[in-house]
Amino acid sequence: MSEAHDERAAPVVAPGPDLRLFGAALDGIPDAVVVVDGSGCIRFANTQVREVFGYEQDELEGRQIEMLIPPRVREGHPHQRSGYPRRPMGLLKLAAVRKDGDEFPAEISLSPIETEHADRLTVATVRDISERLRLEDDAERARHDLLANVTHELRTPLTSILGYVEVMQGLDDAELGPEARRMLDVVQRNAERELQLVTDLLDVAVGSLGQTRLILAPVDVVSLLHEARAAHTQTARAAGLELVVSAAGPDPDAPPALTAHGDRHRLLQVLDNLVGNAVKFSPAGGVITLSAEGLADSVIVSVADTGAGIPLEDQGRVFERLHRGSNALTAQSPGAGLGLSIVQSIVTAHRGTVSIASDPGAGTLVTVQLPRSPEA
């Protein structure tokens, strides 16, 4: 492919004294550097182009810059580069191609320079980042493997503890006294809390790699809301809160049939996190509303509470991993700041969106939009 470019190459333009002096300075840069004029002709290439692209300098000088662009994106490049000389563009991640045809990821910066002549030139600095990306990927996978192994090792004894607790709770009153039963309840609550934290850590480890596993199928959103409500009814009642389900379908006179395309287990996990947060931060006497509404190509699911709301300074960081708002720290509420990060990962994996609107002191509304079909 480079040979075809050679056949159409422009004549080599002899650089003026200013460009030769500038070129001598560019030879000292460890990255590949090419100087391109307004027509896309390479006026100068430094010595590092041999290492990065496999070309000698004289094989590039006088040729079009498109010979360094992969054929699959080459056609539209002349239009794109028409704006390059007018503005600096730094650290672009683009694809480049070597003399042997191998494509590689590159980090490219573009800077305009002025010369004594009317022609404006652009300096393109190109760095092969293949190895860096490989190392980053290896490090990320090693981190993921470590978290996965640690969480697996922690889950095993916690699951065993909960198993024995369940067996002991089945004992009659003659075998297990009231005080021992009360202490056993404390053991169960704390073991369940730790198991949830370990599960959240594993979800974050997997989600951070964009590997959230989904088993996609039609999901009845209304039944999902009722299931989430049932799961949290006892906790909400103990906190003096009311849980309400509201659903609106396209026909106001018929039961709503709201179906999303998703993973039922994962979407229930989203609701569990959102309802759990609402219960945690709502004072007694409040109402938590789980609602769903159908649109043409999506379903809107929301969880609204009448709780303390999110402080203004924390609202921009609610989806950050391990971030806990000032209200959570003040109230010393349990949690590791992973819930909303997990919610965002799951919703994003469904090609959906999640947003939060909060009025400090008046409550919080979390809105999730999910596609109704695979094509939506």
Image (cartoon, rainbow, N blue to C red):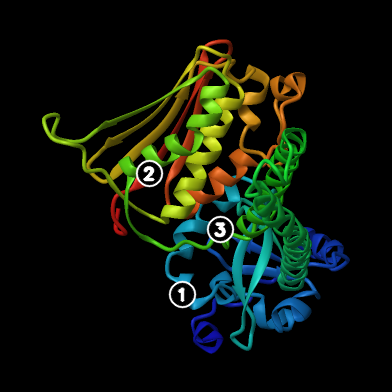
User: Is 15 positioned to the left or the right of 241 in the image?
Assistant: right
Give the residue furthest to the front: 174
Res. 103 image quadrant? bottom right
Q: Secondary structure at mark 3?
A: loop
Q: Is residue 43 above or below residue 165?
A: below
Instruction: Residue under label 1, please give it.
Output: 72
Instruction: Residue under label 3, please give it.
Output: 38
Q: Earlier in the sequence, mark 1 or mark 3?
A: 3
Q: Earlier in the sequence, mark 1 or mark 2?
A: 1
Circle 1: residue type: Arg
Find the distance from the CA under tag 1 to the CA under tag 2: 45 Å
Instruction: Residue under label 2, please give it.
Output: 224
Q: Are marks 1 and 3 in contact (CB under 8 Å)?
A: no
* Image mark for residue 241: none
Q: Residue at x 47, y 70 (%)?
A: 73
Q: Secondary structure at mark 2?
A: helix
Q: Residue at x 57, y 19 (%)?
A: 282
Find the distance from the CA under tag 2 to the CA under tag 3: 59 Å
Q: Secondary structure at mark 1?
A: helix
Q: Is residue 76 above or below residue 202?
A: below
Q: Which is nearer the eye, 104 or 334?
A: 334
Location of residue 226 in the rendering, given as x and y in whole percent from the top left corner: 37, 38
Q: Residues within 10 Å of mark 3 (few under 14, many from 20)?
A: some
Pair 1/3: label in front: 1
Circle 2: residue type: Leu
Q: Is residue 350 visible?
A: no
Q: Is residue 258 visible?
A: yes
User: Is 71 positioned to the left or the right of 134 in the image?
Assistant: left
Res. 316 image quadrant? top right
Circle 3: residue type: Gly
Q: Earlier in the sequence, mark 2 or mark 3?
A: 3
